[in-house]
Amino acid sequence: MSGSRARWAIAVGAVVLAVAHQDWWLWEDRTLVFGFVPSGLFYHGCYALVAAGFWWLAMRVAWPGTVMDGLDAEAASGAQEQASGSDAASTGGPQ
């Protein structure tokens, strides 16, 4: 999916999630799902799973790869410094 198209899909999905979160149609529903879970609670449990999946997908599609590359490089250089002990020596900590 192209960048501009992905941004629009994420924006539309966010609006749909915001509207779906306002479950006014279940406010007076006394139906029990599985015999003990109120329908509004069940709806919000399912909503939470859908929202988590949507935002995970949005992150995978829209997150810039350069940010993660920079973090990976910093983590690798930090691990090398710790292994050599130069970090503890430079801070005056125990060696």
Image (cartoon, rainbow, N blue to C red):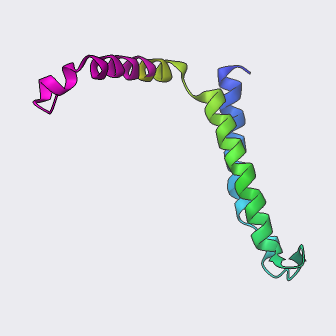
Check the image and report above or below for 70 versus 16.
above
On whether residue 74 falls in the magenta region, the answer is yes
Image-based side of 81 in relation to 2, left or right: left
Residue depicted at x 61% and y 28%: 62
| Image quarter of the N terminus | top right
The picture quadrant where one finds residue 87 is top left
Q: Main secondary structure of the magenta part?
A: helix
Q: Is 84 included in the stretch rendered in magenta?
A: yes
Residue pushed farthest left?
A: 92
Can you give x and y, in whole percent of width and height, for residue 26 in the image?
A: 81, 74
Query: x, y percentage for residue 27?
Result: 78, 78
* Towards the viewer: 78 or 48: 78
Displayed quadrant of residue 71: top left
- The answer to which of 13 and 76 lies nearer the viewer is 76
Relative horizontal placement of residue 51, taking residue 66 as reference (left or right): right
Residue 89, compared with residue 8, is above or below; it is above
Q: Is residue 22 left or right of residue 78?
A: right
Query: Dividing the image into 4 quarters, which one contains the C terminus?
Result: top left
Residue 54: percent from left, percent from top: 71, 42
The location of residue 12, given as percent across then percent down, is 71, 42
Left or right placement of residue 63 versus residue 72 in this view: right
Res 89 → quadrant: top left
> Which residue is drawn at the image coordinates 54% and 20% (left, top)?
65
Boundaries of the magenta span: 72-95
Q: Tell me: residue 27, above or below residue 20.
A: below
Residue in view at x 26 percent, y 16 percent: 84
Against 9, residue 19 (above or below) is below
Q: Nearer the viewer, residue 66 or 16?
A: 66
